[in-house]
Image: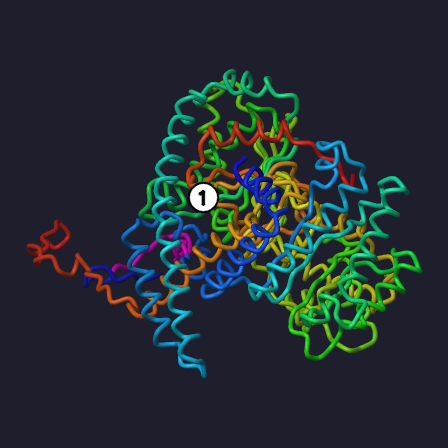
Amino acid sequence: MTTVKVNGHTWSTHSGKSKDKVVEAPVIHNEGKLEPPNKYRSLNVFTVFYMLINNFLRSIKILDKNQTITELILYYINHSILLMVFFIMSIYKNFLWIYRKIVLKSLNVTYYPNKSPHIIRDDVNKLNKIPKRLSCILNFKDEDDENGGIDGLIFDISELVAWSVSAGIAELNIYEYNGIINTYNGELNRYINKNLKNYFGTEYIPNITIKIPHVGQIMVNDASKPVDLTVNLLSAIDGKPTIVELTKTMSELAVNKELKIEDITIDLINEELIELVGNEPDLLIIFNPNLDLQDYPPWHIRLTEFYWEYDNKDVTYAVFIRALQNYAKSKVNVGK
Amino acid sequence: MSVVSINEFISLLANFPIFAYLFSFVQDIIISILKTGPIPKHVAMIMDGNRTFAKKRNLSLKQGHTAGAESLVKVLDTCFRLGVKVVTIYAFSIENFNRSKEEIDTLFGLLRDRLKLLAENENSYSRVNMIKIRIIGNKSMIPEDILQDLEKIEDKTNLETSEKILNVCFPYTSRDDIVHSIKQTSHQRMNGLINKDSITLDYVTDNMYFGPDSLPLDIMIRTSGQTRLSDFMLWQCNYNCTIEFVDTLWPDFKFLSLIMILMKWGYYKTLEMESEMNKLNEKDEKEFVDILKELPPHPPHKSVTDRK
């Protein structure tokens, strides 16, 4: 018997079979959440002005070295010129921001998939090549933001899944720094399938498999059919910490004389990391206002092509298709 | 478009002594202005585009590489005058061994000659300016005669007074670097120097070619418009580092291009520092209200189960 106290009353739950289990509802931990360094990129001119004035005032307090008067005066002149240049830059950046927003908006109108796989396939068929493996860096936005929180993330991922299936991509990696989505994979799977029905109809839904390499979990929808798209959910833990763990294992094997140190080669480590994390993606789309890799697994970005759209925070089809177009233009010549 | 054409115009004008003097004067002013703001400590560069440059201008491969080397000297000078502590350049990738023998020999020879020029005499650039030259990468792949020369250069510039470092990655790939670190760590464990628990992220990082005292990377620049890293400093650049892909070809990448990147970095850094300061001053003074508790009391409960 469990007692739960609600509003001054003590509720006892009796059930004939067995004791009820008290389950804590999952809490989203916001502490330690990585904030992408883009919040300073869209500050308005007045905030920047205020900050620069502050900066200047602070520099007066700090400076008390053994300098001559001329050096001191020169420093102030130079520093104020620098801050003035920064201020002009902030005006310019604001105009640029507006310009880019307009461009992005018009692109979103130009490229609109209209929940139709045919349109997406038509767009893709104009290109001479597409990536086999696509990777996307997504941000966990604040719950209060537009399209934020877990629901926003799930929505963005399910759209990306639908576009990728329609485009014919074989593998999609989703990277989110905190790995928050890992605990919601059931919900994610349900929503992905729901969204796919919007694109493909209710009769034949593409067969999606969701993998969480770090946990070693694979969620299969229909084991009898071939898989149309594998979705890998990655987080920061799949990057450097995994390589550190691998180092521990390798050294353990070396100590136990099961592995010679000379046998540790790039190929061996590569095989292990493919097993632990997955393959190197061909294209990495960063849905961030600037290029910030957010501790993305370093081993896996060797020759990966990057794509990002300045001042864009949203996961939109326009960015997706433009990334593919950019990829089709790129030329890889290793070492040559 | 604009940067290249301005650069070309300036390099044309710089042929006249008066203008050359004027430009160096203006450069000095710009540097002293920029110096009063935040300056990155560690800058890395992928110098891409020498061959495209040569092809575009109908030059030989060697001339292209020479133009690139000239550009490098200027960029290095600007960096160190600004107060950048460490500059890392991607001189030669392990994958570059796939190139023709002739080109590899040219590149090796050029690199050795340039480094010699930087470090040979008492009054050479790096010795006057106290710059330590370090060769980073898999040294076992360098031909014996070149390796000897390079080690001599490393020794000559390795003074206790030198504060600035020039890392020449030769021949280097980041994957090789990571594997090297794993090997080193395993080796140390086999010799009983460390136990399993002391293998941490920092430990693995310290065992890389760059060594334990290397500064974290602030800016990574890649020229010639490619938007990938090509196996260069993957471990170092994927967190808290600004990556800049510029369309300029490396031989055209000069003072102005570099200053613009550093200016942008300094601008965002200043804003970042300021807002952190503001955060410290403000210290969350928000008070949250529990609305449920603030509500007026509800009418008494009356339920069917209460009936006696």
Q: Position of residue A246 (x, y in %)?
A: 72, 59
Nearest to the observer: residue A121 or residue A42:
A42
Say if A50 sits above or below A308 in the image. below
Quick one: which residue is furthest to the right in this view? Answer: B144
The residue that appears at 68% across and 59% down in the rendered structure is B88
Residue A49 falls inside the magenta stretch: no
Which quadrant is home to the N terminus of chain B? Answer: top right
Identify residue for label 1: A289
A164 horizontally vs A70: left or right? right
Nearest to the observer: residue B146 or residue B236:
B146
Task: Say which quarter of the image contains residue B77.
Answer: bottom right
Mark 1 secondary-structure assignment: loop
Say if A309 sits above or below B45 in the image. above
Which stretch appears magenta? A11-28
The crowd level at tag 1 (other Cα within 10 Å; few <14, some 14-19, many 20+) is some
Magenta: main secondary structure equals loop
The residue that appears at 43% across and 48% down in the rendered structure is A140
The residue that appears at 33% across and 41% down in the rendered structure is A146
| Subunit ID for the residue under disc 1 | A
Say if B250 sits above or below B209 in the image. above
